[in-house]
Every structure is written in structure tokens, then in C-alpha cells.
């Protein structure tokens, strides 16, 4: 069931809807970002300023169904868990959390069959403080308590979380160590992609180090110092060293059928105890094949 509200005032949409919906302004912003609330048939940002006569469409049925993400009792590799956080080794091929189009088959569905998470970020992202792309494997952390949620959000925001990825890329990456900085924006021609746009957009900073040359490809250690969407993938493509198997930004490969990117290590401070913790995830089988291929070459 959908309902329509015609805007009668010029005001930010999240603030305006506070008068009509029984939700906090923060939750309204989440609903807008998830596409449950659109204006004139188009997805907008929570900061969108309404014009008089704008048609606001609210998908009450989707909001109601999304409020209860179905748990799925499927394999879950837990690296660490306590009352505040749960750290998972995410397999490739599944997305991190549900979307309005797909409420099942995500990593979050599996976690909710095992434990409860902070409801901040609901309806679709309870306990989610960062994400991994569908094809990316490896370490990811979720918040089980509200206290942990806000603490981890601040750690990511202030760049106190160190993320280390392993990437197999086409070509011989040079120089052996490099820090790359530029700005990125959403690609208007393809909203699911990002592109480099100098002088505009959000700053993306990435530290890259060669671990081994592997014939016609390279194994890299990549540390994103900022957390932009698809940051590593677009950075390596822009530099001319696309990730193997990445059909969106990279290059198809006979060696692997998905993006050869793995979240290897995550370092953060425990939200409640404030002690530094480091979590690692072993390579999945398909990347082990690439690693064996790489180790067969002389540097």
C-alpha cells in the first residue's frame, strides 16, 4: 500500500515528514535513503528541499515488511563475538544487508538467525556500520548494542579503523608503494557506479603496496584511508591496474569469476573496553588458487 502527500511548504523533506510519520527524523532519513520514500517518482536525498506541489510517495507496505528481516539459518563464519560486536568472515557472492528489492539472501539474514543486532539503522541496516561489496570477501563487523553502534560509527568517521585488503590486479603495478588521493562522485549515466571527478565530489585516499609481481598480474595490499563507495575498485581502475574479475570496473579473467578483492584485516578499538583489536580472515578457495598461481612466479 502506498500513500501520497502533496507538499504544502518549502522545507527539507526529512523535517517535513516528521509531522506525518511516527518515526524519528533519523529513521525517516534511512527510509528515504533506502528508497521507501520518493518525490515525484524519483529517489532523493534526505536533504532534498521540497517545492510546493511536490508529490511525496510513501511505500507503507514495504516499510512494514522491511521492519522484520527474515532470519536465514545458513552457514556463518564467526571470527569473534561478544555482547557488543560480532565479526564475520563474509563469503563472496552475497550482499551485506537487504534492499527494498531483496529482503532475503544477505549476510544480515544469516546473522539474525544467530543473534540480535542493534536496531539503529533499521529497517534494512540494523547494526550495520560499514559494508563490503557483493563480490568482496573477508572481515566485516556488526554492532549488537546501540552503544557499540555509535562508537563504531565514530571510529569509522574519524578514520580510527584500519582496513587492509588484498587485491589481485592486471599488470605490473608501479611504483611499489603509493598513496593516491582524488575526489569521486556518482556516475549520473550509471547510478550504481562511481567515477573520478576532480575539484568536485568526496575525497578518496588510498595507500597501495605491492606484495608480489605475478607474471602479468600483481598482488597488492590496499588500505583505504577514507570509506567511499567502491573506493578500491575505482582507484585501481583509474590508475590503469583493474582488479581481476571485476566486470563493473575491472577486467574479465579466466583465473577468477568474481572481483578478486578480499578484506583481509580489520583493526579497531573495542567499543566498551577501548582496547585495540585486530581481526583477520583467511583467503577463500578461489583466491587461494590465484595466490598459488602468483607464488609460482619469480618476483
Image (cartoon, rainbow, N blue to C red):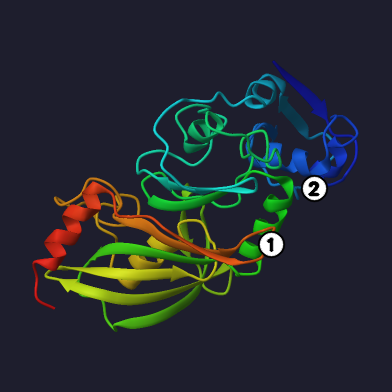
The residue singled out by tag 2 in the image is 49
Q: Position of residue 247 (x, y in %)?
A: 29, 49
Along the line of sight, the residue nearer the viewer: 197 or 259: 259
The answer to whether residue 174 is left or right of residue 32 is: left
The residue singled out by tag 1 in the image is 154
Q: Position of residue 203 (x, y in %)?
A: 56, 70
The reply to whether residue 234 is visible in this rendering is no
Crowdedness of circle 2 by 10 Å Cα count: few (<14), some, many (20+)?
some
Q: Residue at x 64, y 24 (%)?
A: 68
Along the line of sight, the residue nearer the viewer: 175 or 197: 175
Q: Nearer the viewer, mark 1 or mark 2?
A: 1
Q: Position of residue 242 (x, y in %)?
A: 29, 63
Q: Residue 214, relative to residue 127: is it above or below?
A: below
Q: Residue at x 35, y 44 (%)?
A: 92
The answer to whether residue 48 is left or right of residue 187 is: right
Tag 2 or tag 1, which sits nearer the N-term? 2
Q: Quadrant of the N terminus?
A: top right
Q: Secondary structure at mark 2?
A: loop
Q: Position of residue 155 (x, y in %)?
A: 64, 64
The reply to whether residue 207 is visible in this rendering is yes
Q: Residue at x 48, y 25 (%)?
A: 72
Along the line of sight, the residue nearer the viewer: 173 or 84: 84
Q: Secondary structure at mark 1?
A: helix
Q: Residue 198, relative to residue 75: is it above or below?
A: below
Q: Residue 279, relative to residue 6: is it above or below?
A: below
Q: Residue at x 19, y 60 (%)?
A: 291
Along the line of sight, the residue nearer the viewer: 249 or 55: 249
Amino acid at each position: 500500500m502506498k500513500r501520497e502527500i502533496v507538499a504544502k511548504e518549502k522545507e527539507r523533506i526529512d523535517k517535513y515528514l516528521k509531522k506525518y510519520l511516527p518515526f524519528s527524523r533519523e529513521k525517516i532519513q534511512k527510509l528515504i535513503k533506502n528508497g521507501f520514500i520518493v518525490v515525484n517518482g524519483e529517489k532523493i536525498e534526505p536533504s532534498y528541499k521540497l517545492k510546493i506541489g511536490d508529490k511525496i510517495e510513501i511505500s507503507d507496505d514495504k516499510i512494514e515488511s522491511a521492519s522484520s528481516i527474515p532470519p536465514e539459518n545458513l552457514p556463518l563464519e564467526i571470527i569473534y563475538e561478544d555482547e557488543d560486536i560480532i565479526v564475520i568472515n563474509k563469503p563472496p557472492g552475497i550482499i551485506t544487508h537487504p534492499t527494498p528489492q531483496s529482503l532475503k539472501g544477505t549476510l544480515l539474514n544469516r546473522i539474525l538467525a544467530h543473534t540480535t543486532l542493534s536496531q539503529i539503522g533499521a529497517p534494512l541496516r540494523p547494526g550495520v556500520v560499514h559494508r563490503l561489496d557483493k563480490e568482496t570477501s573477508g572481515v566485516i563487523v556488526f554492532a549488537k548494542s546501540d552503544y557499540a553502534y555509535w562508537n563504531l560509527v565514530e571510529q569509522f568517521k574519524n578514520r580510527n579503523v584500519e582496513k587492509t585488503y588484498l587485491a589481485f590486479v592486471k599488470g605490473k603495478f608501479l611504483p611499489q608503494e603509493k598513496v593516491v588521493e582524488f575526489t569521486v562522485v556518482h556516475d549520473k549515466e550509471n547510478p550504481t557506479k562511481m567515477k573520478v571527478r576532480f575539484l568536485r565530489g568526496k575525497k578518496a585516499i588510498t595507500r597501495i603496496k605491492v606484495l608480489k609481481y605475478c607474471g602479468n598480474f600483481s598482488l597488492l595490499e590496499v588500505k583505504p584511508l577514507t570509506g567511499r563507495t567502491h573506493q578500491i575498485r575505482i582507484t585501481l581502475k583509474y590508475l590503469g591496474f583493474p582488479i581481476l574479475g571485476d566486470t563493473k570496473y575491472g577486467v574479465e579473467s579466466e583465473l577468477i569469476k568474481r572481483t578478486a578483492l578480499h578484506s583481509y584485516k580489520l583493526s579497531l578499538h573495542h567499543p566498551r573496553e577501548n582496547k585495540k583489536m585486530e581481526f583477520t580472515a583467511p583467503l577463500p578457495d578461489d583466491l587461494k588458487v590465484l595466490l598459488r598461481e602468483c607464488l609460482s612466479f619469480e618476483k
